[in-house]
Image (tube, rainbow, N blue to C red):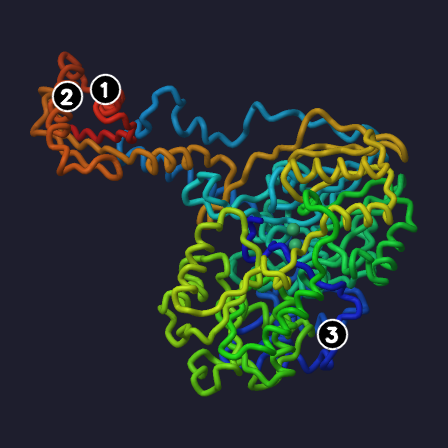
Amino acid sequence: MNPNSNGAPQNNRRPQGRPYRGHRPLDTRVKHASTLSGSAPLPGSSSASRPGSTFSHSPRSAQQNRSVRPFRGNRPTSNATRAGQQGEVRRTDGVGGAKATGGKRRRGRTGERMRKSMTQPPLHHRMAETDPKLPVIPPLPSADAIRVIPIAGVEEIGRNMIVVETADDIVVFDAGLQFVSEESNAPGVNYILPNTKYLEDRVHKIRALVVTHGHLDHTGGIPFIMERIGNPPIYTQYLTSLMIAKRQEEFPHLPTIDMHVVKEGESFTVGKMTIKTFPVTHSIPDAMGVSVITKFGNIVITGDIKLAHVDGKPLEDEVAAWGSVGKDKNVLMVADSTNAEREGFSAPEANVHANIEEIVRNATGRLIIGTFASQFERLINVILSCERMGKKIVTEGRSIKVNIEIAQLAGLLTVQKGTIISSTEIDNYPADRVVILSTGAQGEEFAALMRIATGKHKSIRLTERDTVVFSSSVVPGNEISVQKLKDNIYRTGAKVIHYRTANAVHSTGHGNIGELIWIQQQVRPKFFMPVHGHHSMLRCHANAAVENGFPKANIVIPDNGTILDITGENTFIVQKEKAPSEDIFVDGFSVGAKQEVVIRDRQSLANDGMFVIIATVNVKTGRLRKSPDIISRGFVYLRESQQLLSEARILIKRTVEKHTENMNPLNLDYVKDELTETVSAFLMQKTNKTPMVIPVLIGI
Ligand SMILES: [Zn+2]
Ligand SMILES: [Zn+2]
């Protein structure tokens, strides 16, 4: 899956009965976290007494909240602040406007028509804010209808967002991002967000953002979309709240989040909507599902799910949790489909822990475990195993360090003093006493594991006695880089254990179809909507449901933006209009939907390069003052193309002078257009390439 550091397929046991929770009283763990040597300041570590937090909470999590508090910014959520936030919203729009201006500026500098194709309307027309082609979305069909929209995340893995709307209220569930892969061919784009247009148009109805768990495909959009959706309060569990807060620190200009920490099993009411939470098993603690209570029954949104089980028999925790969801009257179930194409039950994380523990025990040299930083459970278990066996741990990679700190802050883990050592201390310990936890198992070029494998790490060198464990799957798209990484490790002579070896060292966080069907049969919904995955995954999920007796007519397989209106206990409408679902790109720190133009330019530059013509025109005579300059990048190797260049210069001179002859006054924009067309055609004919031709004519 794409979100390679966070939404990664893995699993974890249900939070209830976690062996490690509460090893230490809650109020001491913050102190502990702050004494971590060399640790960056954490939310909560330095300013637990800072006043003015806007954190509110349910009574049972009061103690937790004391340590959550120190979210950046102390602004109260008074009306004044709300107004301020509105101001922020407008400012964001202003930034968008500035970007359009930036585009114009560039045109001014490099020529009125920088694009090679004249069939496109001018840039500023295409950057228009409103698209007249947008469909008119019908209102809710009746006063008590319930609308459910998977805004995104159902035609891809990532950027999950589900909206539930009634006549009075809107609640948004999750706000993820999707990492951009090679094949999406969008150079320079970092990730894609759900389209928030539908929500922006109804911002006055938005009561809350509910976040099911801390993976980036559910939380990553938060810093980018919160202002767009009016900065509603966020409801989520404790660990997730810490992760959101940690990430929010990277965006210090944003207003404080109004964070409400809930515990699994609790209910809360926002507007007139009451939402029940329940625990689910996933690869990160504090993962939850939600039931939205409506007059036609509950809408169950599972979030990411798998089952803790032994040989296909779900553990009692699972039976109890899902059984209790099933006791309610459930009108609709909206469920994770990520692994719906896989048969049977997925490997339980407990097996992975046992296998890794064996490997840790038997290591005769140094052990390097490469894993996703988002695998909290696994990180925690490796640390506990090492402590039991008296081994030292080195953490490599910022995200692993941060997540271990967050785990301690959340009370999920207490690391004994001296367990974690710095990589510079490695040589003070026998090789078989050292375990290195590292990011970069996807072969990322600059990540710790690659540096170790290629001998570029400042203090870790691999030898034949060492073992490297790939405790992760290969995220699609990363096959080549993972292969390169493995080859580099094998070259050092170190032993490699990867996830395909007989004893699992990795398992997914998403249930296979056997688990998904079992869960559905506990929940017993009237209607069913598969989400989280590509269309094939949703389709397989639906097919399996039908094979197991679920009425086909009661299943809605959505696309991004599909509008499902539940109009009664037994009736629904799928509107033929869809909520806007066009990709929203995050490009550096700017966010926008209308960036196809920019991306097309980048694609064109990437494919065929550019060809810049700089010529000085005598405004009196219309003749060139000297032979034009030509600059090109990524097109042809100029030194070996002298013939082409001199032909091009002659053609440029002829073209300019042909058009300026008898032209009075001189219209250089017109000449530029003609020049672009002529030179593009010439280069295409000569080289079979279509570089972006950018003429710059200077009238003197
Ligand atoms: Zn997840
Ligand atoms: Zn997910």
- Res 575 → quadrant: top right
Q: Residue 437's spot in the image, x, y percent?
A: 53, 71
Image-based side of 615 in relation to 377, left or right: left
- Res 449 → quadrant: bottom left
Q: Is residue 479 above or below residue 385?
A: above
Image-based side of 500 in relation to 263, left or right: left
| Residue 383 appears in view | yes
N-term mark: 2 or 3: 3
Q: Residue 526's spot in the image, x, y percent?
A: 87, 38
Secondary structure found at label 2: helix
Give the residue drawn at x 17%, y 32%.
614
Q: Residue furthest top?
A: 662
Image-based side of 589 in relation to 260, left or right: left
Q: CA distance from mark 2 to mark 1?
A: 8 Å
Q: Residue 308's spot in the image, x, y percent?
A: 77, 60
Give the residue drawn at x 63%, y 74%.
358
Q: CA distance from mark 3 to mark 1?
A: 72 Å
Q: CA distance from mark 2 to mark 3?
A: 76 Å
Q: Which amino acid does the dot numbered 3 rest on?
A: Arg
Q: Nearer the viewer, residue 266 or 272?
A: 266
| Residue 84 appears in view | no
Say which residue label 1 marks: 678
Q: Is residue 464 above or below residue 508?
A: below
Q: Which amino acid does the dot numbered 1 rest on?
A: Thr
Q: Which amino acid does the dot numbered 2 rest on?
A: Leu
Say which residue label 2 marks: 651
Can you tell which mark lies on residue 21? Answer: 3
Secondary structure found at label 3: loop
Instruction: Assign ligand 1 to one image quadrant.
Output: bottom right
Q: Residue 31's spot in the image, x, y percent?
A: 63, 82
Q: Are marks 2 and 1 in contact (CB under 8 Å)?
A: yes
Badge nearest the viewer, 3 or 1? 3
